[in-house]
Image (tube, grey):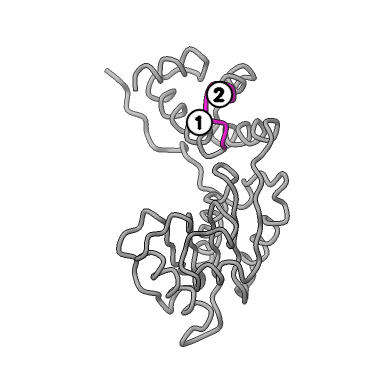
Amino acid sequence: MKQLALDIGLATVPTLASFFAGPNEAALSHLSLWSTSTIRSPVPTYLWGESGCGKTHLLSAVNEALREQGLQVGCLDANMHNPPSFEEAWSAVLMDDVHLYNLEQQHAAFNWFVNALTPATGSPRWVLAAGALPPADLKLRDDLRTRLGWGHVYALQVLSESERRSVLRQEADARGVFLSDEVMAFMLSRFSRDLGSLMQLLDNLDHYALQTQRAITIPLIKLMLESE
């Protein structure tokens, strides 16, 4: 009978400090500045890049940083059906995967955008959005697309293999998990190399290793795949 793994110390919450910037240092510095300032950015910020470059990590990290300050944040992604109306209590608005928004989500995003930058009360709210394409190439309604490209725009780059190794090592150490060089080489050569997929693989391995009470090795990875 399998031992149930306790959800203690398994997944780590994305933070700005845990983001391995590599070639994306300018974007990280910008987000760090505005997520810790008592004044919200007066113009929007847009991050774009291919899958695995860290867009969702950064949005989640900013959300965490703002919530740690006791601030309320409005969040919208492509999986959210029936998006809520804008709330004046929000200090910032975060929009992920905007390139996938349907018409209803685009309508909500535009409404949030307008209300955030020209609020009925208080100062403008920060709008931080992310997508797979540069603003000009987004297949969205014109008024939303132009607003996404109006402020600060950062093109995020996917990390090199050595940088991905560093991130894997950092995340494993944070979980108290040992990954040998052989295991890391196996993970990088046999599975999707984008960082999001690697982090999900590490999370699955962490759970499975606890369930089986075994160290993470190449045979354990193969056993986990066979059991799925």
Q: Disc 2 marks which amino acid?
A: Met
Residue furthest toward the top? 219
Q: Is residue 42 magenta?
A: no
Mark 2: give few (<14), some (14-19) or many (20+) Cα within 10 Å. some
Which of the numbered marks, if any, corresponds to residue 187? Answer: 2
Q: Nearer the viewer, mark 1 or mark 2?
A: 2
Amino acid on which the number 1 mark rests in the picture? Leu
The quarter of the rendered structure image containing the C terminus is top left
Q: Which residues are magenta?
A: 187-194
Left or right of 199, for residue 108: left
- Which quadrant is home to the N terminus? top left
Would you say the residues marked 1 and 2 are in contact, meaning their CB atoms lie under 8 Å apart? yes
Residue at left offset 62%, top offset 16%: 182
Kindly identify the residue that appears in the image at 69 percent across and 50 percent down: 24
| Cα gap from disc 1 to disc 2, whole angstroms | 9 Å
Which of disc 2 and disc 1 is earlier in sequence? 2
